[in-house]
Image (cartoon, rainbow, N blue to C red):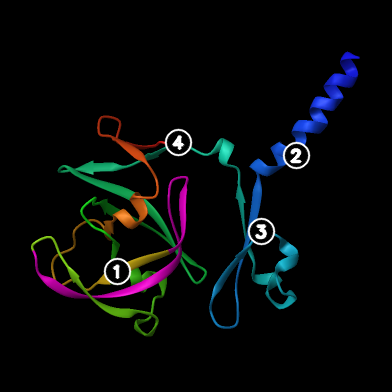
Amino acid sequence: MTRLLIILQILLFQPFALVAQADFFQYTDRDGTVVMVDDESKIPKEFRKKTRTTRSDPTHGSKTTAVRIKNNQVLVPVRFSYRNTSVDAWLLLDTGASTTLISTALADRLGIKAASTQRRLSQVADGRVVQTFRTTLDYMAVGPKLQHNTEVNIMPSNGPTTGFDGLLGMNFLGDFPYHLDMNNQTIEWQH
């Protein structure tokens, strides 16, 4: 009876273990649109050789992300993806920025062309209104937190280099509850 009970438990709980892991497949179609699917059979044959696979296991993901604290500024490592180009950069954590802002240098490294952006007017902290360029990235990731189809603003810079590539704004931070541990220089993700 005990053996039967153990086998029954294994059979009942095994499907739940499979849900915890998922593979995602990414390819770029003829129009330059990045498509992500969860089933490899959904990828058209002509794109299968140029497919990226992302393995996901949320039960083993890190709950913290190391940051740099310099002159009371929190610099966060961020991975960006735009049309099959991934770039790692440091952004200044800015809870006052409603939208994530990236430098033109970072936009260039990602291969973002002006034709794929929309001109916008944005208000900066000192009240000035400046011209920016808005686009949508395939995804942004900070540690274990990933956000697809993220809008960012690109702002031309005339000043000196700042040691970071933009501002990590609330359009990303607002989706992921966190606690900033200044002593250990980490972001602790709440979920």
Query: In this figure, which residue is indicated by the disc labeled 2?
Result: 15
The residues tagged by marks 2 and 1 sit, at their Cα atoms, a distance apart of 42 Å
Alpha carbon distance from label 4 to label 2: 25 Å
- For residue 117, which numbered disc appears in the image? none
Q: Report the residue marked by disc 3.
A: 38
**Res 13 → quadrant:** top right
Tell me the crowding category of disc 4: few under 14, some 14 to 19, or many 20 or more residues within 10 angstroms, Cα based.
some
User: Disc 4 marks which residue?
Assistant: 63
Question: Does 137 lie within the magenta span?
Answer: yes
Q: Residues within 10 Å of mark 1 (few under 14, many from 20)?
A: many
Front position in the image: 155 or 4: 4
Which amino acid does the dot numbered 4 rest on?
Answer: Lys
Q: In this view, does 176 lie above or below 123?
A: above
Which segment did they paint magenta?
127-149
Could you tell me the amino acid type at mark 2?
Pro
Do the numbered discs 4 and 1 sit on residues whose CB atoms are within 8 Å?
no
Q: Disc 4 or disc 2, which is closer to the eye? A: 2
Q: Where's residue 52, x and y in %? A: 61, 63
Per the image, label 3 sits on a secondary structure element best described as loop
What quarter of the picture does the N terminus occupy? top right
> Which residue corresponds to mark 1?
153
Q: In which quarter of the image is the C terminus?
A: top left
Q: What residue type is labelled 3?
A: Asp
Camera-side mark, 3 or 2: 2
